[in-house]
Image (tube, rainbow, N blue to C red):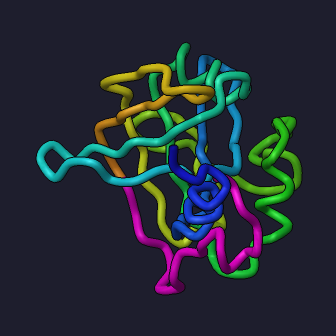
Amino acid sequence: MGNLEAASAALLRHPYGIFLVGSRAGDRLNLMTANWGTQCSFEPKLYTVFIEKDAYTRQLIDEGGVFSICLLPPGSEDVVSHFTKPAEVVGNKLGEYEYFAGPETGAPVYAGSVAWFECRVVEAREVGDHVQYVGEVVNGEVRSEEPAWTLQELGWDYGG
């Protein structure tokens, strides 16, 4: 039998981005900190993201069938920490952070993103303690030339 402790340590070394996932179902919306996601097809352009089964964002994606991915600039610790819990919508802000509705899906997009894109769910399935969503990318924008931030640069880990 293999060494699962060593395998867990190896998984923690895997590089990941740190980003926000936006979700919307009717008038309910949320942004959530996440790091398990990647493009998974060129044609059509597909992106997959993994969300914990008990997350509020999972409920909204299941009901609304859309999500956004918001790439963060370096030094966004406050944003990352804030969106580890559901945030209250007040005007054009989620908590204290501005957002706008994605033009194609209405999913919230963090206004401070270096880049963002929005997706319509084409497939969902349970994978262990997470749900995997595959979304067709329907719109997006690069808003800054800053690089997108990574989980390792933040100094957090999620995995193993």
Identify the residue at image location x=52%, y=70%: 15
Q: Quadrant of residue 56?
A: top right
Range covered by the magenta-colored residues: 140-160
Identify the residue at image location x=58%, y=29%: 130
State the image coordinates of residue 132 (x, y, percent, origin top left). Answer: 46, 31
State the image coordinates of residue 141 (x, y, percent, origin top left). Answer: 40, 63
Is 153 included in the stretch rendered in magenta?
Answer: yes
Q: With 115 as the anchor, is 160 left or right in this view? A: right
Instruction: Return the residue nearer the eye: 61 or 139.
Output: 61
Q: Residue furthest front?
A: 1
Instruction: Return the residue nearer the eye: 118 or 40.
Output: 40
As drawn, 135 above or below 3:
above
Magenta part mainly helix, strand or loop?
A: loop
Is 44 included in the stretch rendered in magenta?
Answer: no
As drawn, 111 above or below 142:
above
State the image coordinates of residue 27 (x, y, percent, origin top left). Answer: 67, 21
Q: Quadrant of residue 31?
A: top right
Identify the residue at image location x=52%, y=38%: 50
Instruction: Return the residue nearer the eye: 143 or 14.
Output: 14
As drawn, 93 above or below 132:
below
Q: With 65 as the anchor, is 100 left or right in this view? A: right
State the image coordinates of residue 69 (x, y, percent, origin top left). Answer: 51, 51
As drawn, 83 above or below 80:
above
Q: Residue furthest left?
A: 43
Identify the residue at image location x=27%, y=48%: 40
Count how many numbered circles sit on residues in the image: 0
